[in-house]
Image: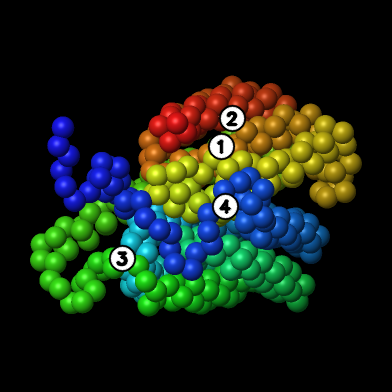
Amino acid sequence: MIRPTGQPPRARRAVVAGVAAPGPAAPGAVPAPRSVGRSLLQAGPVAVAGFVTNAANVLVTVALARLLTTRGYGALNQLNGLYLVVSLPGTAVSVAVVRRAAAWTAGGTGTRVRRWAARAHRRGLVAVACFAAATLLAGEWVAGALRQPGAAGLDAMVVAGAVWILLCLDRGLLQAHRDYRALATNLLVEGGMRAVAVVGFVAAGLGVPGAAAGVLVAELVTAAHARFAADRAWASTDGRAGVPVPTAAGPPGGADLGTDAGADVRGDRRHLVADLGAALVALATVAWLQNVDVIVLGREAPGEAGAYAAVSVASKALVLAAVVLGGYLLPEAALRWRDGEHAMRQLGATLLFLAVPAACLLAVAVGAPRLLLRIVFSTRYLGAEAAFAPLVVAMIFLAVSAVLVLYLLAIGRREVAIVLVAGAAAATVAVAAAHGHAAPTARADLVVQAALCLALSLELVVAHRGRLR
């Protein structure tokens, strides 16, 4: 049998899938580790920065609960919910950026990535400015509808969410370059600035608007740092040896690509949109799975919502830790899959890092739930301790699911979004059947999260049948 010339079979399959044929990693990037131990060392900076940032967020939450009035704290939680809704596409943007950068750097040069990133950043700045203007115009009306004390806090928090999406573009570039130390530094900048600005403004007597302004200041500073770090990282690839990669502005040497260049750009855009759409659906569903029990129980039994929210906040920090660790796993999976390999060692290292806080939280939830809730939230939030342990186990399963989702999205398994949507529907029905009782709600959530984690694990096995052999 005679094969067509020009590309080997695996290269042709990769191009059809929207990922460049196997090639060398981006110049200047950290070499891909070959063992779990080396993967742990490589992921260490991101893991440590993520844990420090999450710990700082917990301390800020406790401080604000004592600095603000009960009504003010409730208003701030409402604004935090709006921030999460607006910033939701951010992680999906990181997924899409890493997938495209993995394809474009197959030839060994980052020129194409830098040019695209600069163009995307300019458009992103314009989009954020337009969004901010629209927010200012509609702020008073939205604040009135939500019964917020004023529009200033709402405007600041919503614009901060939009800035975070732009920040994720540059974080995706750092991930694709495997510059994990710069990524860890950026996480620490965000956590530190949030702690200082938010608590400082509230302590100065600015109340809820001050807390929202602190979040906005922190995101602006973090976004500026990420832009500088990403540009510096990819600038280090310029002028290095490697196979030239055509760019939208034209190929190296000034040759005319004709219609092929236009088709290449259109194909890139099509795959970028597909990656972004699948990631957005998948991660939005993960966010729903993280909060569906709180939403449903709050509607069914408002009187128990506060106590259940306390155990929920403590439990669901695990999912946030999983997403932070995904900042390491996502590029490793995408780049190694592009090269015809797999990233199971990196996946194992990520899950090992996640196991440490999971084990600690589970031990406290089983051994001393009332003590933790009384120390952190005060005796006003006691009453749902029976739901603590099953909810922690449910969130452990969801955290593992979130890691698997990021891995599967990185290797191009967009159908994972369908599995998640089915799981979200099942979770909604299951927790609604508990009729607002705390412990039954947590147990119902646990059953669904365990089943979903099993389904995603099977999807992982199916995706790796050929690669593992």
Q: How many marks?
A: 4
Q: From the image, tell me which residue sits under label 1.
A: 401
Say whether residue 7 is left or right of residue 41: left
Q: Amino acid at mark 4?
A: Pro
Upstream in the sequence, badge 4 or badge 1?
Answer: 4
Q: Which mark is residue 33?
A: 4
- Image x and y of residue 342, in percent: 47, 42
Say whether residue 168 is left or right of residue 181: left
Q: Amino acid at mark 2?
A: Gln
Instruction: Check whether the beta carbons of the residues at disc 2 and disc 1 lie within 8 A of each other.
Output: yes
The residue lying at 76 percent from left, 31 percent from top is: 389
Above or below, 261 against 424 in this view is below
Upstream in the sequence, badge 2 or badge 4?
Answer: 4
Say whether residue 177 is left or right of residue 295: left
Above or below, 213 against 377 in this view is below
Instruction: Check whether the beta carbons of the residues at disc 4 and disc 3 lie within 8 A of each other.
Output: no
| Disc 4/disc 3 C-alpha distance (Å) | 24 Å
